[in-house]
Image: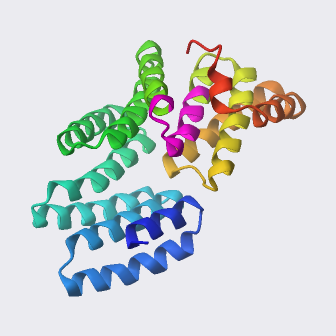
């Protein structure tokens, strides 16, 4: 398994300390070997750890360091992950207009690089920006297109994020019963993969979970949540036009 595969797997499992140790060692190795790809991946991983810990300025700083290495290398493909993190920091900081622009730029870059999965991922994030800006119809359309791509291509790693999108739409529409159900579906989908959400999605999910519990009460939330945990994600959306 490559460093990239190992560190991303550890991050998805929530093994933060391991990610830091692996990344710091990789930075030293990559700089000594003149390997910009390894250094970018390691600095990107440290940026994600900082964001997961709530340190948005630290995450932005690590991402900018990674982007500087990528730009010096002249390899545009190395710009993709740092740019993704910078967009995520803008979104999590509440600067949705800037985040929207950054995600659009990232989509264009990934289209140029021929990376359809990453294009899909950034459209998911763009949809959250539109939702935050109050553009519900635009967000709903983007989420639906993403869901079709994910299920149509059997992109298993993206399935939990499709479920988070379902939670977000239900929350925005004030349907907290549906939101509680979809939180159960999302949590089960992550557990099935042995993963935890990316930091920005984790923050969104936590906020929506709190909103649903507040609206429904813990008992009613728990009932819907438990029902959601028994549903297969495709089935959860089978009769849903959102």
Is 58 part of what is drawn in magenta?
Answer: no
User: From this viewpoint, which residue is outermost toward the front?
Assistant: 153
Give coordinates of residue 241: x percent, y percent: 57, 12
Dominant secondary structure, magenta: helix
In the image, 131: left or right of 86?
A: right
Question: Height in image: 151 above or below 64?
Answer: above
Name the quadrant of the N terminus: bottom left
Question: In the image, 111: left or right of 46?
Answer: left
Q: Is residue 165 magenta?
A: yes
Q: Quadrant of residue 171?
A: top right
Q: Position of residue 71 (x, y in %)?
A: 14, 61
Residue drawn 32% across the image and 33% down it: 100
Q: Is residue 54 above or below residue 96?
A: below
User: Could you say which quadrant of the image residue 170 lies in?
Assistant: top right
106 left or right of 164 in image:
left
- Kindly identify the residue that appears in the image at 42 percent across and 28 percent down: 127
- Residue 10, percent across and down? 53, 67
- The residue positioned 34% from the left and 43% from the top of the image is 118
**Residue 29: % across, % down:** 30, 85
Give, as a single range, the part of the protein colored magenta: 151-166
């Amino acid at each position: 398994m490559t460093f990239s595969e190992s560190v991303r797997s550890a991050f998805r499992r929530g093994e933060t300390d391991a990610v830091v140790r692996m990344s710091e060692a990789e930075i030293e190795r990559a700089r000594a070997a003149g390997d910009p790809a390894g250094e970018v991946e390691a600095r990107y991983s440290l940026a994600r750890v900082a964001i997961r810990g709530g340190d948005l300025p630290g995450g932005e700083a690590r991402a900018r360091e990674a982007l500087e290495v990528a730009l010096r290398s002249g390899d545009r493909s190395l710009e993709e992950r740092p740019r993704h993190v910078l967009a995520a920091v803008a979104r999590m900081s509440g600067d949705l207009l800037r985040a929207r622009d950054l995600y659009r730029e990232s989509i264009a870059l990934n289209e140029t690089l021929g990376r359809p999965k990453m294009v899909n991922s950034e459209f998911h994030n763009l949809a959250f920006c539109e939702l935050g800006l109050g553009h519900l119809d635009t967000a709903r359309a983007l989420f639906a297109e993403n869901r079709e791509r994910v299920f149509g291509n059997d992109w298993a790693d993206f399935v939990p994020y499709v479920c988070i999108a379902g939670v977000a739409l239900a929350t925005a529409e004030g349907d907290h019963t549906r939101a509680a159900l979809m939180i159960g579906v999302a949590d089960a989908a992550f557990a099935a993969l042995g993963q935890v959400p990316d930091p920005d999605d984790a923050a969104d999910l936590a906020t929506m979970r709190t909103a649903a519990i507040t609206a429904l009460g813990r008992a009613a939330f728990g009932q819907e949540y438990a029902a959601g945990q028994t549903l297969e994600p495709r089935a959860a959306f089978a009769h849903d036009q959102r």
